[in-house]
Image: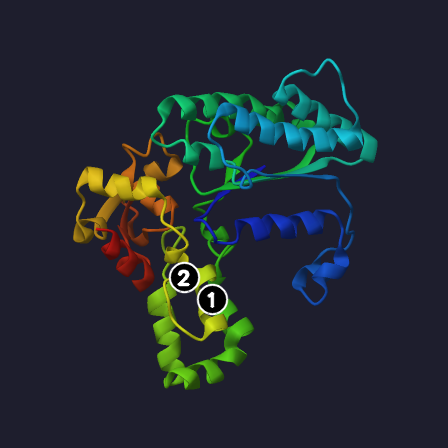
């Protein structure tokens, strides 16, 4: 079981959709890619894919409704057990019955696990209610561990008090692992390999040389580091829109900065220069207790700050803005 935290619009949903197709054995979708040769068996596993992004969570009932819709849909395939009354026991039963019915362990993919809690920031009672409900729901993964082949949960923020992290001792957080730094986003090598043919025409349209264009792309959209001493990662949303439109712009930033981040900045009276030159205890990457007290965790995990340097002796990371898009966008908020 794995957990991955990345900023919004960084490719988390695409990653899970790709994993879904892989575990369903859809070999034809991977033609020409490395995995086509690396995977020999292409076994088909049953997949339970829950996307919590497609709901407005303004009450506990709205979260219960979203979970109930998913559970009801799965129960159409694996059957219903009347004794299972709660959302958690239904989820556990679905995993076990699906595995027995298909003769294979189950793959579980949960996208934007933290969406309800993010929408409840500033409403502590509602957020605590969401925590309590999700604590038992995600706890079903531990109870049904023997029936699960693979599980991945993604989100923007790691909330340390949620039971997926306190109860699931077999959940591996890969968010800050060096060897997963390039799992989402676009690396310099991927840009050159996949978009290199577009560079000549793009550079001519802007009156730049190819090296000048590449340098500008790096300054505007590169610079994300999800672990110390790793290569920079481009913001995929902004980079792809820039190539599509042949024009530089604040594409990712323009999609909307969460209002709670703006309020945090104003409430804490942080100036731009201080925000861009802070040091951060690496242990704080372990999870957010409260955005009110974990300002830098909030800005780092939401993609507005990144790791600029690291002192291994004191386990301290230096934070800063990843690129010009973010620096200019933050300046406009203050």
Relative to residue 118, is residue 8 depicted above or below? below
Relative to residue 87, is residue 174 depicted above or below? below
Q: Residue at label 1? A: 241
The colour scheme of the drawn protein is rainbow
Rendering quarter of residue 280 = top left
Q: Residues within 10 Å of mark 2 (few under 14, many from 20)?
A: some
Q: Position of residue 286 (x, y in %)?
A: 39, 36
Residue 46 visible at all = yes
Q: Quadrant of the N terminus?
A: top right
Label 2 vs label 1: CA separation? 7 Å
Evaluate if marks 2 and 1 touch, with contact meaning CB atoms under 8 Å apart: yes
Q: Position of residue 321 (x, y in %)?
A: 29, 56
Q: Is residue 266 left or right of residue 34?
A: left
Q: How many circles with numbers are drawn on the protein? A: 2
Q: Is residue 158 left or right of residue 39?
A: left
Which secondary structure, mark 1? helix
Report the disc number at residue 48: none
Q: Position of residue 36 (x, y in %)?
A: 72, 61
Residue drawn at 32 percent across, 52 percent down: 307
Relative to residue 83, is residue 116 depicted above or below? below
Residue drawn at 79 percent across, 26 percent down: 79
Which secondary structure, mark 2? helix
Q: Residue at label 2? A: 251
Sooner in the amino-acid sequence: mark 2 or mark 1: 1
**Which residue is outermost to the top?**
83
Q: Is residue 109 left or right of residue 147?
A: left
Q: Nearer the viewer, residue 259 or 178?
A: 259
Residue drawn at 77 percent across, 27 percent down: 97
Residue 281 visible at all = no
């Amino acid at each position: 079981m794995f957990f991955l935290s990345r900023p919004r619009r960084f490719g988390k949903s695409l990653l899970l959709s790709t994993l879904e197709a892989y575990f369903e054995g859809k070999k034809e979708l991977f033609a020409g890619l490395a995995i086509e040769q690396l995977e020999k068996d292409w076994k088909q596993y049953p997949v339970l894919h829950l996307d919590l992004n497609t709901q407005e969570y303004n009450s506990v009932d709205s979260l219960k409704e979203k979970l109930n819709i998913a559970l009801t849909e799965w129960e159409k395939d694996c059957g219903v057990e009347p004794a299972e009354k709660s959302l958690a026991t239904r989820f556990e039963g679905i995993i076990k019955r699906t595995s027995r019915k298909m003769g294979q362990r189950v793959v579980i993919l949960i996208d934007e696990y933290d969406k309800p809690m993010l929408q409840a920031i500033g409403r502590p009672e509602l957020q605590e209610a969401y925590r309590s409900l999700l604590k038992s729901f995600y706890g079903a993964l531990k109870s049904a561990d023997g029936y699960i082949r693979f599980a991945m949960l993604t989100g923007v923020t790691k909330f340390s008090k949620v039971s997926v992290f306190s109860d699931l001792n077999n959940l591996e957080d890969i968010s800050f692992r060096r060897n997963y730094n390039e799992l989402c986003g676009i690396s310099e090598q991927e840009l050159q390999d996949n978009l290199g043919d577009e560079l000549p025409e793009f550079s001519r349209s802007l009156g730049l040389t190819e090296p000048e264009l590449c340098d500008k792309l790096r300054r505007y959209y590169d610079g994300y580091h999800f672990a110390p001493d790793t290569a920079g990662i481009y913001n995929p949303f902004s980079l792809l829109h820039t190539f599509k439109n042949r024009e530089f712009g604040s594409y990712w930033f323009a999609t909307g900065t969460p209002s709670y981040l703006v309020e945090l900045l104003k409430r804490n009276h942080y100036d731009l220069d201080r925000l861009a030159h802070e040091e951060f205890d690496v242990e704080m990457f372990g999870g957010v207790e409260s955005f009110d007290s974990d300002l830098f965790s909030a800005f780092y995990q939401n993609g507005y700050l990144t790791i600029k340097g690291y002192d291994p002796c004191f386990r301290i990371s230096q934070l800063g803005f990843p690129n010009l898009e973010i620096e200019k966008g933050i300046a406009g908020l203050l």
